[in-house]
Amino acid sequence: MREMGREREATKVAYTVEQLVAFNRYNPDILPDLENYVNDQVSSQTYSLDANLCLLRLYQFEPDKMSSQIVARILVKALMAMPAPDFSLCLFLIPERVQMEEQFKTLIVLSHYLETGRFRQFWDEAAKSRHIVEAVPGFEQAIQGYAVHVLSLTYQKIPRTVLAEAINIEGLSLDKFLEHQVANSGWVIEKSQGRGQVIVLPRNEFNDPALKKNAADSVPLEHITRIFPILS
Amino acid sequence: MANQDYEERPQTQELGYDPNFVPDSVKSFVVHLYRHIREKNVYEIHQMYESSFQTLSERLFKDTPWPSVDAVAHYVDNDHVFCLLYREMWFRHLYARLTPTLRQRIDSWDNYCSLFQVVLHGVVNMQLPNQWLWDMVDEFVYQFQSFCQYRAKMKNKTEQEIALLRQFDQAWNVYGVLNFLQALVEKSTIIQILEQEKEGLEQFTATDGYDYNGGSNVLKVLGYFSMVGLLRVHCLLGDYHTGIKCLLPIDISQQGVYTSVIGSHITTIYHYGFANLMLRSECLWSLLVKDSEWTLPSKDSNPFQALYPDLINYLFYRYVEAIREFNKILLYIFKTKQYHQKSPQYEQILKKNEQMYALLAICLSLCPQTRLVDETVNSQLREKYGEKMARMQRYDDEAFAIYDELFSYACPKFITPSAPSFEEPLVNYNQDAYRLQLKLFLYEAKQQQLLSGVRTFLKVYSTISFAKLASYMEVDEPTLRTILITYKHKTHAVDSDGKITSNADVDFYIDEVQVLALTTICITESVDTIHVVESKPAKRYGDYFLRQIVKLEGVINEMDVHMIFSLKEFNSGSSPVSKIVRANVEHSFNLLQDTIHVVESKPAKPYGDYFLRQIVKLSYYVNYFSLCSSLPLSSTSIFLNILCSPKPLVFFMGVSSNPKVFLSDKDLKGANFVDPELGLLVPNEGCQIFIQEDHHLFKLKHLSVQERHQQQQDNKDRH
C-alpha cells in the first residue's frame, strides 16, 4: 500500500497543472490541484484561462465541491484580463443561482462597467468592494492598462480630466504617471488655451486614418488556398 | 442483475407484439448485412444501412421496436461485434420512433460502453461507411443530451425511476461521455494522422477516411468524428472556448471527412458558428498562443505553431468567423438540398438550415458585415428575417424580444450535467442551463445594441461635434464618451502579443474636439467635435475574384460531363465561341491587375502572375463550358475537381463521398478522363469508367479508337 501511495505521489510531481489540463482534463481527481493553482496565480500574478475554465467545468459537474472563494478569485482574474472576454467565458459555466451571491453580483456589475467604458462608475463600485478586488494583487494596474488600451484606440488627443477619470489617478500621482508614459510610451503633453492639459496619444492605425493599412486590398492566404485545387 | 432484467421485460401480451419474432425480411437483412460486413463491402453495407434499414423500419416497425438482438443473434453466428452494432441501431430506431424508458436508456448506455470498448481495444477489423460511424457519435451525444433533459425533469418521476437513477448513477455520466469521446480521439491518433497528412506522409482525407490496404477505418473515423462530438458536448455545457479548441485539428476552411456526411457537416458548422457567436470577439490566434504559452516556455518551440501553422497566420473575429461559416454552409445546403430529399436526415437538415438563418440574422444584427454574405443567402435571409432584422437594429424592448425569440429558437439544447440531489425536494431543472445562456447572451446583445445608434450617425457624418452627436443620440456628453469607448472596445480584439485587430465596419477617432470618422471611427475631442473620416469604399477585387472563382468551380462541378469538345478547335480561335471568350479574358485581365498587386505583396514568389495566368486559363474553360452546354444539369453529387492544365483538359476524379450516387456509364461516356494514378490523358482514346463496388473507386478503361469514334458520332447526332 505504502509503495503504491508513494508511486502516485511521484507521478503527481512529474506533471504540471498545465499538463494535467491538457491530458487529463475530464478527471475529477485533478480538482484540488486546480484550486491550488488558482491561488498560485493570485500570489504570483500569473494567469491561465484554460486551467481556470477546466476547474469551473469540474465544479459544474459536481456542484457540491464548488468553493465560492475560488470562483471569486477566478472571476477577478478574468476581469484583469480585459479586453479579452474571459469574464463571460467563466460566467457561461457558473450556475445562475451561484451568480446570485452578493460578491458575484458585484463582480458582474464591475464587468458591465468595464465592458461599456464607464470607468468612473467602475472605480466607485470597486472602492465599495475592496475586500473582493484587493485580495488579488495587481488588480488596479491591470484595469488601468485596459483603460489606457481603449483610450488609445479612441483618442488622438485626450483632455487630462478624461484620462484621470478613466484610470482613477489624480494630482501628483497623475503627473508621475504621465511623466512615465511620456518617457516610455511616446505620450506628449500639450497646453491648450484655457482648457487645461491635453495629452497627445501616439498615433496608431486605429486612431488615425492615415495609418490604417488598406486591409481591404489584401487577400488572406486562407481564401487563396481554397482555390488551389482549381488553379494548377 | 440479469434476472432482474428479464423480469422487468414486459411480456408479449402487454406489448402487443412479440419482441422475439423475426420476419423473413429481417432475417435476410441481418444475414446480408453480416455477410457484407465480413466481406468489407462498404458500398453494399451503405446501401443496406441507408435504405434497406429505413424501408424495413417504415414497413414493419413504424411504432414497434425491431426484433430483439437475442432473436437475431443465431443468424449471425452470435457475432459479438455485429450484435453490438445491431443493438446500437435497435436503440437508435427506438429513440427516433418511440419514447425510451429509463431502463432502455441505461441499456443503451451499456451497449455504447461495450461497443466503444471493443473499438478502443482495436479488436474491430471492419470497414464501415462514414455515414454509419458519424451516426454513432451523433446518436451517442444525442442520447446523452436526451438523458440529461430527462433526468432534470424530476417532478414527475416515479419512486422506481428514482431508485434506478440512484442505482445506475454511472449511466450517461458526463465524465464517462467526455472520456469516451476523448479516448476515441487519443487512441485513434487522429490528430497526428491529420498532421502527417499535411506533410504527405499519410492519407486520410483523400480516401475519405477509408482504408484500402485491408485495415479498418472504424477507430480512425470514430476518433475523427469524436472531435465534432466533443465540440457539441462542450457547446451543450456552455464551454465554447474549450469546444472550439477540440475542433482545432480539423481545418474547417477546407473540405474534409467532416464534409463527407451531410449531417456531420451541418453539425460541425452549426456548433462552431454558435460557439463563435457566444465568444464575441476573442481572437482565435490569441487562443492558440495563450495555450501554447503554458505548455512551452519559448515562442520558437511553440508546438501549436507547428501543429496549426496556417491557423496561426490569420486573426479573425468571432462574429465575422461565425458569419463566414454560416454563409458557406447555408449556401451549400441551398444548392444541394434537393439531393437529400429522400435521406432520413432531410427533416433535420431543413431544421438546422432554418436555425442557422436565425443565428446568421443575430450575427449580422450585432456585427453588420453583410458583404461577407453571398447574394443567394442574403436574399433568403431577407425573406425570412428581413423585417425582424430591421427591428433588431433598435435599442428597445421589442428588439430584445426578437433577440430572445431567435436565440431560443436556434440555440442548442443546453444541459445541466450534474445529477440531481435526491434528498432535496424534487424540482425540474431542465431549463436552468438554457436560461443562463440566454440571459448572458441578451446581456451581451444589449451592450452591443447600444452601438448601433452611433454606427448610424457615423455613417452619415464625416465630422460631428460632440455636443451635436450627444443631442442626436439623446444622451449627455459623458455618456456619449462611454458609448464611443465601448464601440472601440467591442470592435477591436487584442491577442496576447498586444496585436490589435478591428472588425468595425465604420470607425472613428476623436481628436481634441471632434469625432473624426475613419471608415473606422476616431474621436478628436478638444473642442467637442467628433471627426468621422470617411474612407472611400475600398475596391475589393481580390475578394470578388476569389468568390467568382469558387462560384465558377461550382458551375463546373454541377456541369454534366456529357459533351466532348475538341480543344484544338477551341485553341485555334476560329470558332465564334473562342472569340467571345478572348474578349472576356481581356476584360478580366484588366480587372485582375488589382489582384496581382495584392497577391504579389506576399513574399518572394510571384504568385500574382501565376494566379493571373491560371485564372485566365480557367475563365477560358468556364466560358467555353457555359456557352456549349445546353444539357440539363444531371443529378451528380459526384465531385469532380477539374484541373485545367495547359494542354488537354483533364478531369480528375476523386472518390465519391457518397457511394450511393454514381454517374451511369452513359453519363460518363464521351468525356476525356485521366487516370488519377497515371496522371496522363491519352487524347485520342476515350475511356470508360466503371465502379468497383466494394471500394467504390472509379476505375478507368481505355476505349479503342473505334469505340471512341462511335461515341463522338453519337454525340454529334444528339446535338
Image (cartoon, coloured by chain):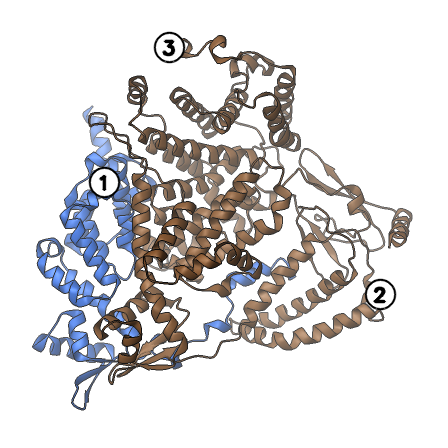
Of the numbered discs in the image, which one, if any, rests on residue B51?
Answer: none
Q: Secondary structure at mark 2?
A: helix
- The picture quadrant where one finds residue B461 is bottom left
Measured as percent of width and height from the top left, residue A92 is found at 29, 47
Residue B261 position within the rendered picture, expressed as x and y whole percent measured from the top left: 56, 41
**Label 2, label 1: how many angstroms apart (C-alpha)?**
75 Å
- Please say if B7 is above or below A118: above
The three-letter amino acid code for the residue at tag 2 is Glu
Disc assigned to residue B569:
2
* In the rendered image, the vertical position of residue B174 relative to residue B444, given as above or below: above
The label on residue A13 is 1
Instruction: Pick the residue in front: B541 or A47.
Output: B541
Does B701 sit left or right of B382 as displayed? right
User: Are the numbered discs 1 and 3 placed on the same chain, yes or no?
Assistant: no
Q: Is residue B692 found left or right of B474 in the rendered image?
A: right
Residue that carries the numbered disc 3 in the rendered image: B4
